[in-house]
Image: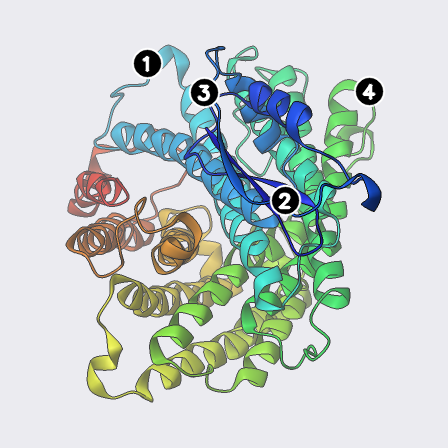
C-alpha cells in the first residue's frame, strides 16, 4: 500500500491511497491514526511543504474480512451501494424460488407421483407457498423497487442521497431477516402448506399440520412489509423534498414517477395486509375468533382484506418495470417518451383503479350480482390507461423508422415486454368477466395469465434493466454488454422457454385442470402438459 502526502491549496494534509487494495481494514486504520494530522492551527502547520511519496510495506496481519463485510453492508448508507445489495439479494432469493419451481414442474411432468412421495403430499403445498412468497416479496419487489429505485431515483432527480440513508440501510437488513424467517418455516414442523394467500381456516386451524410454520411465515411477511413501508416513505420524501430546484413533478422522468406511485400504493395497502396477518396470528395462537364461522367469524372477510392488498400488489410489481422500460425505450430512441404527461396520468389511474377492483379474485365466494357487475366493469376499465402506455411506447419506437433501432438485446427486451404484457393483459380481461371466471377460476388459465404478466413482464423488466444499465452499475468487466452474442442467447432462450412453458397452460385451463394439485387424471395427460414441462429448463438456462 502506498500513501501520498500532499498539501492542497488550503494547507491541509492529505493522504491519498494509491494501492489497488487495502490488505487489512484494521491495519489501514492504524496507519491513518499514526500518520494523519488532524486540523491544526495555522501556526502549527509546516510552511512550504512539498509533496513526497511514502511507501509502507503491506501488513502481514490476517485480513479482517468480517470487518470489511460488516462495514460495507451493515454500516453502508450510500444509495448506490444499497441498490446493488438489493439487486444481489434479489438474485440470490430468486434462485431459491426458481429451484422450488423446478420441483413443481418435475412433479407435474406426468400423472402419478414422481418425486414427492404419497406419504408427504403436503410438500407440494409447501413448494407452491414458498415459490409464491419468494418470487413476489423477495425477487421482484427488492429487485425493481429496492434495487433500481435506490440506485436511480436520486440520480434522475439530481439528489445527493435519499432523505433517510440509515432507514434505507435498515430496510435491506430486515428484508434479509424476513427471508430467513420464511425459509425457517420450511424446516419448522412439517412446513407451511397454506398457499401464498394464507386463507383461513387452513392457516388458522390448530388442527392443521404445522401452526408454528404458519406463524413463522407471518412474522417473515410482517418484517418484509416493514421493509417495503420504510423504503416507500424514503422514496416519497426524496421525490417530494430532495429533487433539484428546477425540477417539478411535471418534469421529473417517468422512472421516479413510477416509484412515487408504487410507494403510495404500498403505504395504502400494506397496513391492511399487516392487520389481516395479525388477525390470522391471533386466531392461531391467541384464541381469537376473527375468521371462525362457528363463533360468528367470517373467513371471507380475510379474503377481502388480503385481496385489497393483493391486487394493488400486482401493480406494485409491474409499475416499476414500466419505469425501467420507459428508460430503455427513451434511451434507444434518443427522445422523450411520446406523451410524457399522459404516461404519468396513466400510471396514476392504474394505481387508483387497481385499488378498487380486488373483488375480481373472489367471484366464486357468492358475491351478489351488483358487486360482480361493478368489479367486472372496473376490471375492463383498467385496460384503458394500460393501453395508453403500450401505444405511447410503440409511438416512441416507431418515431425512428430504421429497424426500430433494434441493435441490442435490451432493445429486443423492451419490445418483448410490450408484446407479452399485451398478451397477459388480454387474458386478464377475459378472467375479469364474472361469468367466464366462474368456469376458469383456480384452473391453469389463471396460472398462465399471471405468469405471463410477471415472468415475461416484471422479470424481463429486471433483466432488461440490468443489461441496459449494467455498465453504469457494475462497470465494464463484470457483465457482458447488451450487444454481445451472450446477451442475445439470454434473450432468445428466456423468451422461447417462458413462452413455451406458459402458453400451453391456457389450453390446460380450458380443459379445467385445477391448479395447486400435484396429480391429475390420465385423461388430462395432454400434449399441452407435456410441452409445458421440458421447455421450462430452456428458460432456466437463459439467465445463467
Crowd band around label 1 with a 10 angstrom C-alpha radius: few (<14), some (14–19), many (20+) = few
Q: Is residue 203 visible?
A: no
Q: Is residue 10 left or right of residue 16?
A: right
Q: Quadrant of the C terminus?
A: top left
Q: Give the residue pinned by disc 4.
A: 286
Q: Is the Cβ of the residue at disc 2 closer than 8 Å to that at disc 4?
A: no
Mark 2 or 1: the one toward you: 2
Q: Is the Cβ of the residue at disc 2 closer than 8 Å to that at disc 1?
A: no
Q: Is residue 292 left or right of residue 121?
A: right
Colouring scheme applied when the structure was drawn: rainbow
In space, the residues marked 2 and 1 are separated at their CA atoms by 79 Å
**What is the number of the mark on residue 9?**
none
Asked which quadrant contains residue 275, the reply is: top right
Q: Nearer the viewer, residue 142 or 2?
A: 2
First in residue order: circle 1 vs circle 4: 1
- Look at the picture and state if 412 lies above or below 301: below
- Look at the picture and state if 4 lies above or below 186: below
Residue occupying the point 24% across, 88% down: 401
Q: Give the residue pinned by disc 1.
A: 117
Q: Is residue 249 visible?
A: yes
Q: Give the residue pinned by disc 2.
A: 49
Q: Give the residue pinned by disc 3.
A: 57
SS category of the residue bearing label 4: loop
In space, the residues marked 2 and 4 are separated at their CA atoms by 73 Å
Amino acid at each position: 500500500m502506498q500513501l501520498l502526502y500532499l498539501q492542497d491549496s488550503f494547507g491541509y494534509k492529505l493522504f491519498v491511497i494509491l494501492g489497488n487494495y487495502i490488505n487489512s481494514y484494521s491495519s489501514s486504520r492504524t496507519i491513518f491514526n499514526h500518520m494523519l494530522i488532524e486540523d491544526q492551527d495555522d501556526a502549527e502547520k509546516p510552511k512550504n511543504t512539498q509533496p513526497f511519496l511514502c511507501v509502507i510495506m503491506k501488513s502481514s496481519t490476517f485480513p479482517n474480512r468480517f470487518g470489511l463485510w460488516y462495514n460495507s453492508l451493515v454500516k453502508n448508507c450510500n444509495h448506490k451501494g444499497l441498490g446493488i445489495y438489493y439487486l444481489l439479494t434479489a438474485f440470490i432469493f430468486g434462485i431459491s424460488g426458481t429451484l422450488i419451481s423446478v420441483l413443481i414442474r418435475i412433479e407435474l411432468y406426468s400423472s402419478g407421483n414422481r418425486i414427492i412421495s404419497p406419504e408427504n403430499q403436503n410438500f407440494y403445498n409447501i413448494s407452491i407457498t414458498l415459490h409464491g412468497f419468494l418470487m413476489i416479496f423477495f425477487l421482484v419487489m427488492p429487485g425493481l423497487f429496492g434495487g433500481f429505485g435506490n440506485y436511480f431515483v436520486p440520480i434522475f432527480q439530481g439528489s445527493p442521497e435519499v432523505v433517510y440513508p440509515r432507514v434505507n440501510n435498515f430496510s435491506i437488513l430486515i428484508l434479509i431477516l424476513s427471508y430467513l424467517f420464511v425459509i425457517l418455516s420450511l424446516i419448522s414442523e412439517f412446513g407451511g402448506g397454506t398457499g401464498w394467500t394464507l386463507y383461513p381456516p387452513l392457516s388458522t386451524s390448530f388442527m392443521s399440520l404445522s401452526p408454528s410454520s404458519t406463524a413463522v411465515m407471518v412474522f417473515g411477511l410482517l418484517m418484509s412489509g416493514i421493509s417495503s413501508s420504510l423504503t416507500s416513505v424514503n422514496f416519497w420524501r426524496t421525490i417530494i423534498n430532495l429533487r433539484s430546484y428546477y425540477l417539478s413533478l411535471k418534469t421529473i422522468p417517468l422512472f421516479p414517477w413510477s416509484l412515487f406511485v408504487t410507494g403510495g400504493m404500498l403505504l395504502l395497502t400494506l397496513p391492511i395486509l399487516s392487520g389481516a396477518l395479525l388477525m390470522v396470528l391471533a386466531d392461531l395462537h391467541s384464541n381469537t375468533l376473527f375468521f371462525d364461522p362457528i363463533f360468528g367469524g367470517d373467513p371471507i372477510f380475510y379474503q377481502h382484506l388480503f385481496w385489497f392488498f393483493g391486487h394493488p400488489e400486482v401493480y406494485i410489481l409491474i409499475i416499476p418495470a414500466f419505469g425501467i422500460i420507459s428508460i430503455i425505450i427513451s434511451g434507444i430512441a434518443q427522445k422523450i417518451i411520446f406523451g410524457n404527461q399522459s404516461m404519468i396520468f396513466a400510471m396514476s389511474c392504474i394505481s387508483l383503479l387497481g385499488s378498487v377492483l380486488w373483488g375480481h379474485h373472489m367471484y366464486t365466494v357468492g358475491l351478489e350480482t351488483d358487486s360482480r357487475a361493478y368489479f367486472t366493469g372496473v376490471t375492463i376499465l383498467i385496460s384503458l390507461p394500460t393501453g395508453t402506455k403500450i401505444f405511447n411506447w410503440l409511438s416512441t419506437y416507431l418515431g425512428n423508422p430504421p429497424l426500430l433501432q433494434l441493435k441490442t438485446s435490451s432493445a429486443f427486451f423492451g419490445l418483448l415486454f410490450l408484446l407479452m404484457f399485451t398478451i397477459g393483459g388480454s387474458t386478464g380481461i377475459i378472467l375479469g368477466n364474472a361469468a367466464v371466471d366462474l368456469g376458469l377460476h383456480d384452473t391453469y388459465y389463471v396460472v398462465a395469465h399471471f405468469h405471463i404478466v410477471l415472468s415475461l413482464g416484471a422479470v424481463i423488466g429486471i433483466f432488461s434493466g440490468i443489461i441496459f444499465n449494467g455498465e453504469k452499475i457494475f462497470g465494464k468487466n463484470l457483465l457482458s454488454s447488451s450487444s454481445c452474442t451472450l446477451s442475445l442467447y439470454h434473450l432468445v432462450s428466456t423468451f422461447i422457454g417462458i413462452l413455451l412453458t406458459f402458453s400451453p397452460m391456457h389450453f390446460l385451463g380450458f380443459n379445467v385442470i385445477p391448479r395447486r394439485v400435484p396429480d391429475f387424471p390420465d385423461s388430462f395427460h395432454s400434449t399441452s402438459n407435456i410441452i409445458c414441462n421440458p421447455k421450462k429448463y430452456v428458460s432456466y438456462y437463459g439467465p445463467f
